[in-house]
Amino acid sequence: GEDVEQSLFLSVREGDSSVINCTYTDSSSTYLYWYKQEPGAGLQLLTYIFSNMDMKQDQRLTVLLNKKDKHLSLRIADTQTGDSAIYFCAGNTGFQKLVFGTGTRLLVSP
Amino acid sequence: DGGITQSPKYLFRKEGQNVTLSCEQNLNHDAMYWYRQDPGQGLRLIYYSQIVNDFQKGDIAEGYSVSREKKESFPLTVTSAQKNPTAFYLCASRDRDRGPVNTEAFFGQGTRLTVV
C-alpha cells in the first residue's frame, strides 16, 4: 500500500518561511493535499495540487511537487504564531482512499 | 449549514465494553471514512464506505465494526476485541471521485476515546 512519510517536527521563528516536506511511494494519486490540524480538532484542507502540476501558489502557501522523486513540499511564507499546528500531506489512491502522512508539528516562536 | 458532526467529543469506556461513535453528515457525500490518530503515527484508516449498504476494511479494521444504513450516517463501534482503543477518532466524508475534478474531504471535530 501507499506509504507517506513526513518529518515529525519543525520549529521556526515568526516571520520566517517554513518548509514542510513529504515523500510518498505510490505515484497513482490524482491529487495531493495538505491539511492543517489545530489541537484537539479535525483536519482542514489548506491546499491541494493536481498530479500533473509542478507548483501551486495560494497566498502565503506554495506547494511544490516533484513526481520523479515522489516529493511534495509546503512552503509557508511569513509564518505566524497562528500557523502553529500539525500539517498532514495526503494522496488519493484507488477506491477513493485518502492516505495520510505521519504529520509534521510546526511550532512558531515569537 | 452543511457539515460533518461527530459525537460525543469525549468518551470513556471500561475495558471489555463495546462503544459506538457517531458520525453524521448533511453534505450529501457518497463516501465516508473513519480514521484513528495516535501521536507520531498520523492518521490510519479503519473503515471506509463509498455508498450506502457497502463498506470496506481499511488498514487497521481489527476490533472495529461499522454500518452504513443511511447516506448521512456512518457509526463506528469499538469492540472489546480492540486491544488498544484509547485514541483520537476522526470521521470524514467526501463526494465521489470525478476524474480531474478535485473532491475535498471534510472532517468532523473528532472523538477522544479513553479506556479506563
Image: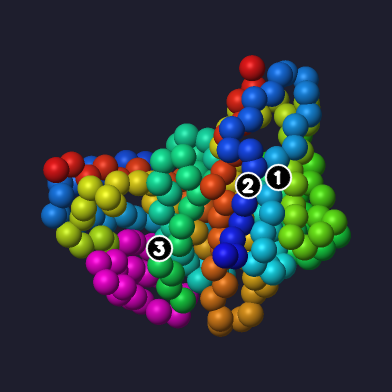
Q: Does residue B95 lie above or below B35 as drawn?
A: below
Q: Position of residue B85 (x, y in %)?
A: 66, 29
Q: CA distance from mark 1 to mark 3?
A: 26 Å
**For mark 3, does the 10 Å Cα neighbourhood hold few (<14), some (14 to 19), or many (20 or more) residues?**
some
Is residue B68 one of those drawn in magenta? no
Gap between marks 3 and 2, in whole Å? 21 Å
- Which mark identifies residue A46? 3
Quadrant housing residue B31: bottom right
CB under 8 Å between callouts 3 and 2? no
Residue drawn at (68%, 50%) of the image: B23
Q: Could you tell me if the residues under marks 2 and 1 are in contact, i.e. CB atoms within 8 Å? A: yes
Amino acid type shown at disc 1: Ser
Q: Which residues are magenta?
A: A51-74
Numbered disc 3: what chain?
Answer: A
Q: Helix, strand, or loop for circle 1?
A: strand
Q: Quadrant of residue A106?
A: top left
Vertical side of A3 occupied by A8: above or below: above
Task: Give the residue type at disc 3.
Answer: Leu
Sequence-earlier tag: 2 or 1: 2
Question: Which residue is denoted by mark 1 in the rendering?
Answer: B22
Q: Amino acid at mark 2?
A: Gln
Q: B11 or A99: which is nearer to us?
A: B11
Give SS at disc 3: strand
Q: Would you name the residue on which mark 2 appears?
A: B6
